[in-house]
Image (cartoon, rainbow, N blue to C red):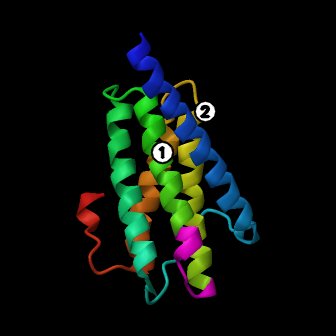
Amino acid sequence: MRRTTLPCALLLILAGALSSATAAAQSAHEGHAAHAPLTATAPVPAQRWASDAPLRKGMRDIRVAVQALEHYEHGHMGIAQATSTVALIDTSVNDIFANCRLEPDADVALHGLLARFLAGAEAVRTSQQVPVAEIAAMRAALARYPQLFDDPAWDAATD
């Protein structure tokens, strides 16, 4: 019993720290809070916006986490693992907020995508059942990313 108490306590401490970091980063970035998530019908720009290294890394990390949530949807992952997985999404979004520098229009489009990831992560943490629709919305945001941003190494076939 004692062997499981320490790892569980550490996990709870880590989750609390990540939640605080997420709240702080979102608060620091609240000037962009008015950006509405992009809809599937939002126009694709004539020329995709440039991406920078922090954006590319963050989106790859988000993709790995969203893909892992498929195991949660199929019952092969418990809520503790799913919560840890969405903490990776929060961390990646916060890193993008802190380090990515884009033109204003590209920034608006990006924030529409990031809002979907944050909403999906929150739904996983708080829903009594697997939030299938919110996870699907995160997948849709991943599919939208290469339509909006020029990321030469992004392989859309893996979404």
The residue identified by callout 1 is 86
- Amino acid type at circle 2 is Thr
Give coordinates of residue 6: x percent, y percent.
46, 24
Residue 100 among magenta residues: yes
**Neighbours of disc 1 within 10 Å: few (<14), some (14-19), many (20+):** many
Q: Say whether residue 42 is visible.
A: no
Which numbered disc flags the more N-terminal residue, 2 or 1? 1
Relative to 5, does residue 34 appear above or below in the rendering?
below
Give coordinates of residue 33: x percent, y percent.
72, 65
> For the residue labelled by badge 1, is the local secondary structure a helix, a strand or a loop?
helix
Give coordinates of residue 124: x percent, y percent.
52, 37
Q: How many marks?
A: 2
Relative to 156, does residue 129 appear above or below in the rendering?
above
Q: Quadrant of the N terminus?
A: top left
| Residues in magenta, as a range | 96-104
Quarter of the image where one finds residue 111: bottom right
How far apart are the two marked residues, 2 and 1, measured between alpha carbons?
Answer: 11 Å
**Neighbours of disc 2 within 10 Å: few (<14), some (14-19), many (20+):** few
108 left or right, relative to 31: left
Quarter of the image where one finds residue 142: bottom left
Look at 57% across and 24% down and name the residue there.
128
Give coordinates of residue 72: x percent, y percent.
38, 33
Q: Residue furthest top?
A: 1
Quarter of the image where one finds residue 42: bottom right
Q: Say whether residue 98 is visible.
A: yes
Residue 107 among magenta residues: no
> For the residue labelled by badge 2, is the local secondary structure a helix, a strand or a loop?
helix
Look at 52% across and 66% down and name the residue there.
95
The residue identified by callout 2 is 126
Look at 58% across and 52% down and name the residue there.
118
Relative depth, front residue between 128 and 98: 98
